[in-house]
Amino acid sequence: SKLIRLHTSAVVVSFLVEFMPPYGKPKVEAVMKACPARTAAVVVAVLAVGFSAHGQEKKKPSPKELTRIVAQGDKLLAEGRLLEARDSYLTVIKEDPTNAAVALKVARVSEQVQDWGGAIAAYQIVAANTQGAEQANAYAGLAEVYVRSAKYQEASDSARKAIALNPSISSAHVNLAYSLLRIGSTQEALSAARKALETAPASAVAHATLGE
């Protein structure tokens, strides 16, 4: 639907702004503030300006080349070269900004280097472009990263979405309980903590929420 396409475009813009070079950010951020409901075509046009080297467009990589870049990123990751691996993945995302599989790799590497903003942006791409269990895991990942960023309202919202899709995700229940406690929703937090203990009986957070 049109609304879904617009939402996806907004998520993609937020993700790419998080990682784009400094000289490209002001142009994209200005468009986001002035015209939040621009179509995907306009978004792509603006991003092309931000990512091109001072306005010079580069030849787009072929699908085969993108596959090679992902493999290169995987190799760098296996060698422990996390930031270089993420740069490889980001190259692919810039060309294919709805690629949930590669965005998930970016999210996980970003978590490892404790770049919470990058992880949030990447998980948002995954959540916007998956369904079912994959989407549930993406929302659970978002809840975890939002907690680490001390964004507790966003954490609780994401945790609820994860639980609605897959009630068995223990981390979502734990993060829901913790985030609700932090925003002052004590009774809801207690209820969420009891649910958390059903899926994660050893959760220290859930036990602490219940005062045990």
Image: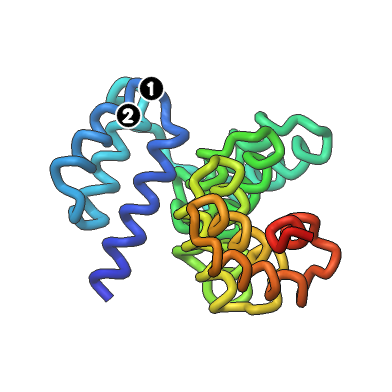
Quarter occupied by the C terminus: bottom right
- 78 left or right of 210 in image: right
Location of mark 1 (residue): 22
Counting from the top left corner in percent of width and height, residue 82 is at 71, 33
Work out which quarter of the rendered image holds the N terminus and state it: bottom left
Question: Residue visible at 54% across and 48% down?
Answer: 146
* Residue indicated by mark 2: 25
What secondary structure is marked by label 2? helix
The answer to whether one can see residue 192 in this image is yes
Q: Is residue 73 above or below residue 55?
A: below
Which residue is painted at 71% across and 70% down in the image? Answer: 196
Residue 16 pos. (x, y %): 41, 41
Q: Which image quarter: residue 159?
A: bottom right
Q: Which mark is residue 174?
A: none
Locate residue 16 relative to residue 32 in the image: left or right: right
How crowded is the residue under tag 2: few (<14 C-alpha within 10 Å), some, or many (20+)?
some
Mark 1: amino acid: Pro
Closer to the camera in the image, 179 or 26: 179
Q: How many marks?
A: 2
Q: Is residue 176 shown left or right of residue 31?
A: right
Label pair 2/1, CB-CB below 8 angstroms: yes
